[in-house]
Structures are given as C-alpha cells and as structure tokens.
Image (tube, helix red, strand yellow):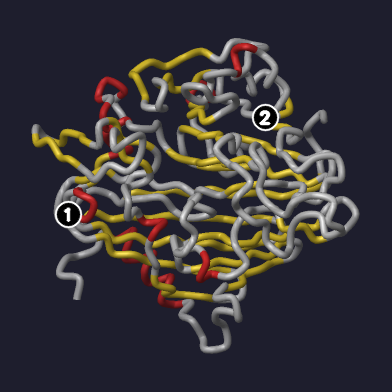
Amino acid sequence: MLGFKLPAVVSAFVAAAVAQQYNGTLGPDANGKYEISAEGIRGLFIPYGASISNLFINDTNGIERDIVLGFDNASHYSEDPYHPHFGGVPGRYANRIKNSSFVIDGVEYHVLPNENNNNDTLHGGPDGWDWRNFTVVAHTIDSITFSIVDPDGDQGFPGEVISYITYTMTPHQWHLKMVALSTTKKTPIMLSSHTYWNLDAFQNNATALALNHTLFLPYSGQRVGTDGILIPNGTILPNQQYSVNDFWSAPKQIGANFTSPDAYGNCGTNCTGYDTCYLVNRAQNGPYDWRTEGPVATLASAFTGIQVDIFTDQYAFQVYSCGGQNGTIPLKSTQGMFDGSRPRVVEQYGCIVMEVEDWIDAINQPEWQRSKKNIFGPGDDPYVLEATYSFSINKTLTL
C-alpha cells in the first residue's frame, strides 16, 4: 500500500492506466523494446529512463525514417559510459541546479552534484531518473505507461515522489503526459523529454549534421540568461530580431548564424551554437488551449520533408544543437549511410534536442515567481506536463 490518499486527478489517471492493463499479447521485443503505433507513426520505448528509442515516420517519398537517436539494444543504455540521456525523462528536476542547492520554506537542501567539476547538478544528479529502470504498468497497441517511485532523500531531494509517464500514438501524432506527485514533503519537480532529433535519419547525402534543419519558435522573443557553465544568472534576455537567437520573427536553419561572432559563447564558454532556454510567451493572446493555439516550436527538414509541430502546456523550451557530440556514439542500424561513405557515428552538431519544460533553475530565482510550477508538496495538485508532437510533410515553413 502507498500509505496515502491520492488526489482525485491522480486517482483517475492511475485508474485509466489500470483499465488498459498489459494484456499478455504485448511486450518487449528481442532488443528489449516496447512498440506502440498508429497510422503514419511507430515508436519503440524502453523502461530505462522511460526512454523513446526509435521513432519511425514516412518521408515525402514514403520512405520510413527513424528520426530520433538511441541504441539498437535496450541493454546498451545502462552500459554506455557517455550517457547522453538519449530519449529519457530527466528527473526529478530537469536541467541544471545552481550550486546543487536550493531553499524551501527557509530550509537549505543540498543535492548530489554531477557536472562542471561538481559545481552544479544536471538532470537530477548522478543517478537521476533517466539512469533508472521504470516499471511498465500498462501497454496497449497505441499506448504505454511507465512508473517510478523516487524515495525520500535520493540524490539529496526531500520527500518521496511517485510518477507516471504515458506515451500515446494517434494518427501522425506522438502524445506524452507526465504526472508526478510529492507524497511526504515539499520538493522541486520539473520533468521533460530529452529526445535527440535528426529528421534526416543521418541519410542525407549532403550532410550528417542537423544544422540544415529549420526551426521556428513563434512565441520565444526572450531567453534565460546564463553564465559560462549554463547556470541561469537571473536575467531574462531579449532575442533581438535577426540576431543569433532570433527564431521567433521567421523560421531559419539551425546553422544559419554559426559563422557570426555572436554564436561563439552562445552555449557557454568556448561553445558555438545553442544550449538555450527560450521562454514561451503566449499570455498576451488571452485564454488559450495549448492543444490548438499553435505550436510552440516547429522543426523541419528539406531533405526528408518531415516536419514536427510541438504543442505543449509548458512555458519554456530548451534547444541544444549537440555541440558536445564527438563522434564516439554509434548510429542505430536503422539510421545512416549504408555504403561506407560516412562513419556510422553521431558527429558534432549531428542532432537537435528540444525540451519542453518550465523556466530552468527557477527554484533558485524566487523573483521569477515560478514556485507554483516548480515546488510541490502533499495536498498540492500533482505536477503535470503534456505535449503533442504532430508530424506532416512540410506545409508551413519556408525552407
């Protein structure tokens, strides 16, 4: 027994998961992956990190492309020494925590550091959620639900947290819903999907990189200011029109401004590119339904013609241009050139990470007034994140 009463919204969610129980005919394949699918879309998932491992979409010529990064076998995720967080759910607090500490109700907590010579905590610490095996609690043809119980004190975080991660496919769409409940103490919670994208599936004769992908962030005229190790410094910066960080005034290719002097240092000290938290500013439009108000981001490839429109209820959007990749991680057997013309590895800038989330490290920026989105305790409504990734052949972007 859990020893507490679940709020009605979580009880209903759990009941729905139980109602679609694993029916004995579905389960992992020989590589330890669980498949769900719908018309025009097919995904493979693993319990490690509740991760997406493969996502197959037909391109403009009807060729099925695997457009997310991962490994061929589920067992390799826990063995890879680099651990790139491929497709997992970082938690219990995504992105970085300054000085690996925070204060709740006057009490200072210290969590385990794991980045920048142990000067901060990234994605929940050295044993964050995307390092752990979740439990498969429901699996149908088009949906799968994973769960995890994160104990009080793990990685230094206060309180027990119970979470359910549900992925669902509908025609040409991938939906995710993340619910987390703090059962015993107030604690920070911020989740995301750490999916790495290459809409070319590394099969573009012209390039192995994703810098040719076109990105549009129509609500993101601002970004979170950071220091040289990407820790928020409390500032909110404007993305001036036509500047390196302007993806809001018009769509542009990820690599369009890489030769600009302003691109150097834009993702941290001695880094060229993006590892940037863009704010999602929709409030001026008045009440809106995030499912229909228009995507917060659109990514498209001219090579495959594949376009993904991202709809979410979150208020920030992290973009990482994979500057940290160094060619040591192999491609999956479903990706890359098969004629020996190119190394079958992920090269620097060979991918794009797009994280739906709240304002990063807001727990250490109380003046931002994000506590209702970042701190949760017993009796509070649960943390909820929802997003829909809608796929089509290029319709809206000028490439």
> Residue, x 32% and y 55% (percent of image)?
127
Q: Is residue 50 above or below residue 267?
A: below
Q: In this figure, which residue is indicated by the disc labeled 2?
A: 216
Q: Which residue is mark 1?
A: 153
User: What's the residue at 65%, 37% (across, down)?
Assistant: 349
Label 2 element class: strand
Evaluate whether residue 286 shows in this view.
no
Q: Quadrant of residue 16?
A: bottom left
Q: Residue 336 vs residue 326: left or right?
A: right
Give the vertical position of 353 relative to 22 (above or below): above
**Residue 377: x and y, percent?**
19, 48
Q: Position of residue 280 (x, y in %)?
A: 51, 28
Residue at point 17%, 49% (across, down): 158
Question: How far separated are the C-alphas under marks 1 and 2?
Answer: 40 Å
Residue type beneath disc 1: Gly
Residue 221 appears in the figure = yes
Q: Nearer the viewer, residue 185 or 332?
A: 332
Among the 4 quarters of the image, the one containing residue 308: top right
